[in-house]
């Protein structure tokens, strides 16, 4: 597969290059020349495949790696995830079951394997994050099918923290490829720039840049949002977003463009106090410990269901263990870090 960037469709780049760089020479994000589209038969076959094989097949669509299930298992272990059923047809998908208790290790290991390098300690490129998240989403959907969460032909809603917009963007691509994903709930913290754009069609670009572990933000909107603008509205609008940020001016779209941009997305804002209350309440009711980012996704899903009702099963994506935010979570619960580790059964 060859790639373009969100700011220039005249030059093509190799898959190997997009694994080694966050952005192209023009500063744009790498995007596939043509996103793979799966037939119904291909989706059914993926949902029937073992998790590791499913992940391998999706990654092989984006990179000439010729991975198989054994390669994926070697990189990430036999079951790098755990599904936690909650009430009201909600499932938490813990994607952090590895020695680092963080999804980033999975991305590092798989992107390293695709590149053919043994050193997996470097920071993966932004497209590596996207591709691995798409592959994990496909593998998890197969697991949902096997345990009865996902009924054939019926999608599930998915809630993820917004951050740099990488997780929602990967889910958006997965849905466009044909995977059974319904509404994607983008859960923001007090920085509500994404909410402003998806609900009002306008966003300030002169806010404080959003921290991210993938590419650096050009300005104060989620950097991966440029991929969504490119995919839904075209390169001209992606360039308008970039130029607005460069000049510190608002970026706005008309009603027709907003309808395309926000299709199948729901943005919610969950403030810090509410996030803390969610962590306490979920633990009190379910004796389950939420990481702050997963708590944002939980709150965003609550907001979405308060608006539309409980119409489909829903999944909350958790990419980090609460132990990664041990001091914060312990303080919220009024316990010590040692007690938190004991409750997580971590030595």
Image: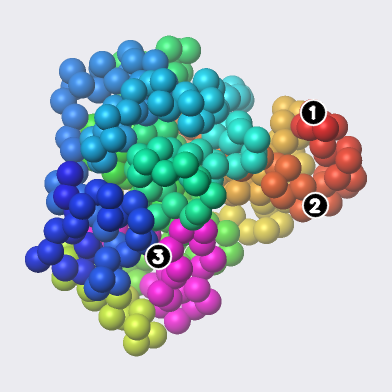
Tell me the SS state at disc 1: loop
* Magenta region: 203-232
- Residue lying at 42% horizontally and 27% vertically, measured from the top left: 72
* Name of the residue lying farthest toward the left: 10
Q: Indicate whether 283 appears above or below 188.
A: above
Residue 220 counted in the magenta span: yes
Is residue 118 toward the left or the right of residue 135 in the image? Answer: right
In three-dimensional space, the C-alpha distance between marks 2 and 1, rounded to whole angstroms, equals 16 Å
Between disc 3 and disc 2, whose residue precedes?
3
Q: Percent position (x, y) of residue 247?
A: 34, 87
Between disc 3 and disc 1, whose residue precedes?
3
Q: Which of pointers 3 and 1 indicates the residue nearer the eye?
A: 1
Q: Percent position (x, y) of residue 249?
A: 35, 84
Which of these two is toward me, 201 or 340?
Answer: 340
Mark seen at residue 223? 3
Q: Indicate whether 167 appears above or below 54.
A: below
């Amino acid at each position: 597969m060859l790639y373009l960037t969100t700011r220039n469709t005249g030059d093509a780049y190799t898959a190997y290059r997009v694994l080694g760089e966050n952005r192209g020479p023009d500063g744009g994000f790498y995007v596939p020349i043509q996103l793979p589209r799966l037939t119904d038969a291909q989706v059914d076959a993926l949902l029937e495949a073992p998790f590791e094989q499913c992940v391998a097949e999706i990654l092989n669509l984006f990179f000439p790696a010729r991975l198989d299930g054994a390669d994926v298992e070697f990189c990430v272990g036999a079951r790098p995830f755990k599904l936690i059923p909650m009430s009201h047809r909600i499932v938490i998908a813990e994607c952090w079951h590895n020695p680092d208790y963080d999804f980033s290790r999975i991305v590092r290991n798989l992107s390293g394997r695709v590149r053919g390098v043994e050193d997996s300690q470097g920071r993966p490129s932004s497209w590596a994050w996207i591709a691995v998240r798409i592959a994990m989403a496909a593998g998890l959907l197969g697991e949902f099918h096997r345990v009865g969460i996902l009924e054939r032909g019926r999608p599930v809603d998915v809630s993820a923290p917004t951050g740099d917009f990488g997780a929602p963007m990967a889910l958006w691509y997965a849905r466009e490829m044909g995977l059974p994903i319904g509404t994607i709930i983008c859960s923001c913290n007090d920085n509500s720039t994404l909410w402003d754009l998806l609900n009002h069609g306008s966003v300030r670009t002169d806010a404080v840049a959003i921290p991210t572990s993938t590419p650096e933000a050009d300005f104060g909107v989620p950097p991966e949002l440029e991929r969504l603008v490119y995919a839904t509205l075209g390169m001209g609008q992606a360039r308008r977003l970039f130029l607005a940020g460069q000049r510190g001016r608002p970026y706005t779209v008309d009603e027709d463009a907003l309808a395309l941009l926000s299709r199948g997305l729901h943005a919610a804002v969950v403030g810090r106090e509410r996030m803390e209350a969610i962590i306490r309440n979920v633990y009190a009711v379910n004796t389950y410990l939420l990481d702050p980012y997963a708590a944002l996704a939980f709150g965003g899903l609550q907001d979405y269901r308060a608006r539309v009702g409980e119409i489909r099963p829903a999944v909350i994506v958790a990419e980090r263990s609460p132990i990664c935010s041990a001091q914060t979570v312990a303080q919220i619960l009024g316990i010590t870090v040692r007690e938190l580790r004991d409750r997580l059964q971590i030595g």
